[in-house]
């Protein structure tokens, strides 16, 4: 079996992937009365390093704010957010009061979401 993608569709999917997460995060921040610059920690799915870099740049966040486990685990698909969040919590990378934003997309952008929490590490 050979699965091929039309070049135009591939470009469309890549463009959608590059813009979906920053758009969702921007809307979420607006809905909760925050700015993307208020984000302390961003955790996303991690399809590849290019998306991670583009999302971070679009949101004007530095690399230390956008946590990922890509080098260790690669593309974890939907599991990337909980796995990365768990590793960050266990490593003490999340401080009480941090605005933690989680976002991702799947299936060429047909499914996408964002959520935010104020981190409270109390047991």
Image (cartoon, rainbow, N blue to C red):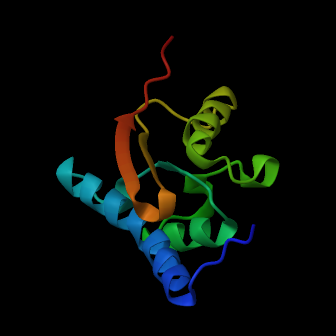
Q: Which percent across, then down, holds residue 58?
A: 44, 74
Task: Looking at the picture, tell me which residue is in the foreground, 31 or 9.
Answer: 9
Placement of 51 over or under 103, stated as above or below: below
Residue 81 falls in which quadrant of the image? Answer: top right
- Residue with the most extreme top position: 123
Closer-to-camera residue (46/87): 46
In the picture, measured across the screen, residue 117 lies left or right of residue 1, that is: left
| Residue 21 x %, y % | 42, 62
Residue 50 sits above or below residue 75 on the image: below
Across and down, in percent, residue 28 comes to 27, 53
Residue 123, placed above or below residue 11 = above
Query: Which residue appears at 33% of the width and 59% of the height?
Result: 24
Quadrant for the N terminus in the image: bottom right
Image location of residue 108, percent across then percent down: 48, 64
Residue at 43% x, 39% y is 98
The residue that appears at 75% across and 53% down in the rendered structure is 74
Residue lying furthest front in this view? 1
In the image, taking residue 50 as reference, residue 1 lies left or right, namely: right
- Numbered-mark total: 0
User: Which residue is rendered at x = 54% and y = 74% of the image?
Assistant: 54
Res. 46 image quadrant: bottom right
Q: Residue furthest right?
A: 72
Q: Nearer the viewer, residue 118 or 58?
A: 58
């Amino acid at each position: 079996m050979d699965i091929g993608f039309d070049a135009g569709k591939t470009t469309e999917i890549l463009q959608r992937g590059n813009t979906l997460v920053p758009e969702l995060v921007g809307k979420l921040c607006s809905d909760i009365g925050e700015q993307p610059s208020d984000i302390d920690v961003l955790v996303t799915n991690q399809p590849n390093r290019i998306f991670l870099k583009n999302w971070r740049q679009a949101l004007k966040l530095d690399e230390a704010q956008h946590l990922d486990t890509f080098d260790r685990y690669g593309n974890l698909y939907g599991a990337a957010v909980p796995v990365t969040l768990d590793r960050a919590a266990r490593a003490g990378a999340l401080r009480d009061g941090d605005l933690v934003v989680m976002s991702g997309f799947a299936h060429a952008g047909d499914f996408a979401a964002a959520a935010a929490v104020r981190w409270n590490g109390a047991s």
